[in-house]
Amino acid sequence: MVNQTVSLIIIHAALETDSSKGMEDITPALSIGNVGQLAVDLLVSSTGAETVGYLDDQFVLPCVGNDAYRPSPRGDLALPLQAYESSSSGLTLIQQRSPVVKGMMVEYAKNLADFAAASGNKHVVVLSALDFGRLQRIDMSSEPCIFKMSYVSFLGHFSGPQIYYLSSTSVNGTDDYCEQLGWKRLQEYHPAQRGWKYLSSLAEGDVGDENNFAFEDDLEEEDYYPSLPFAALFSCFKARGLKVTCLLCYCSEGDNMADAFNLADAACKFLRLNPDNVRGDDAEKWTVPFSWMTVYGPPPDMSMF
């Protein structure tokens, strides 16, 4: 079935059933280390979520692969935008496996927001990561606590990264429940700053000449965060009247599995998921997706050492 309004093709009719209305929606925003996507992988695999549909958007690049979660694929293909549903957890999970066409992130975010609103979702959780180098830059500019702040951030990165958040529940992005969980609001969110203001105008389809500038042209330091994919998703979901919460962590490129575990765990805490609905292997909390086994290739030949 083709939805002419949002340019999304629904392959499985299950996405339009009443059972999905009012469910929590989790989606990644492409970012450094692909942490948001890895966290969604963990949630899909561990909640036993099943494929309920594929979304086709003209702004997402094509890709195809085998089933990412089972050792013996049943002929199911993994495509760029795939929807999963866990009825026991009350979750709809959207996995994005390929990037958005350059310059089209806001248009893609509008399409996804239109689809979420039309599907009856009331709350969307966006999972993403931020560049750890930016966190160091922020901390080191905080005189006279240069050493103290950077040292604390350094230790925190290895003992369990701090979760940051951004919520649509208040104008300044704060959320009482997130604060109770010990998380910090993303301090770079300033609704009146030109980047965030322009992004909000784009999401609402109301861009005046006074706010018209391109994110690709002469970005200033304060424009960096509004230019990221999570910011476009946040602004577009918010513009459609949906409650949206972004859960974020700082990380570096490399083996980001630990960051994914941390972000997925944060999502479970935030959504108050029943531990019985998150089943792991061998009494572990998480079921590691089968596709992760070959992410970094086979282990080294120890006879070399």
Image (cartoon, rainbow, N blue to C red):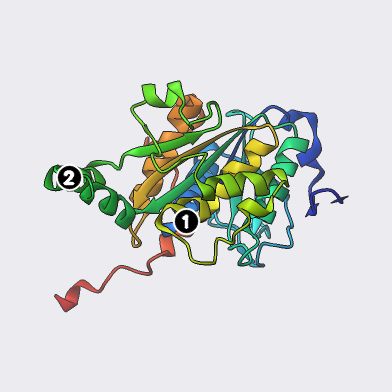
Work out whether mark 1 precedes mark 2 in sequence or the reverse, and give the earlier one: 1
Left or right: where 257 falls relative to 118: left
Q: Is residue 169 visible?
A: yes
Residue drawn 45% across and 43% down?
Answer: 287
Read off the residue under disc 1.
31
Closer to the camera in the image, 117 or 96: 117
Q: Position of residue 187 (x, y in %)?
A: 38, 39
88 up-or-down from 29: above or below: above
Closer to the camera in the image, 52 or 27: 27
Residue drawn 53% across and 56% down?
Answer: 71
Q: Position of residue 88 (x, y in %)?
A: 60, 28
Which amino acid, by three-letter code, is at mark 2? Answer: Glu
Left or right: where 214 falls relative to 175: right
205 up-or-down from 272: above or below: below
Residue lying farthest bottom? 304
170 up-or-down from 298: above or below: above
Alpha-carbon neighbours of circle 2 within 10 Å: few (<14), some, or many (≥20)?
few
Disc marking residue 143: 2
Could you give the CA–CA distance between mark 1 and mark 2, rounded to whole angstroms? Answer: 29 Å
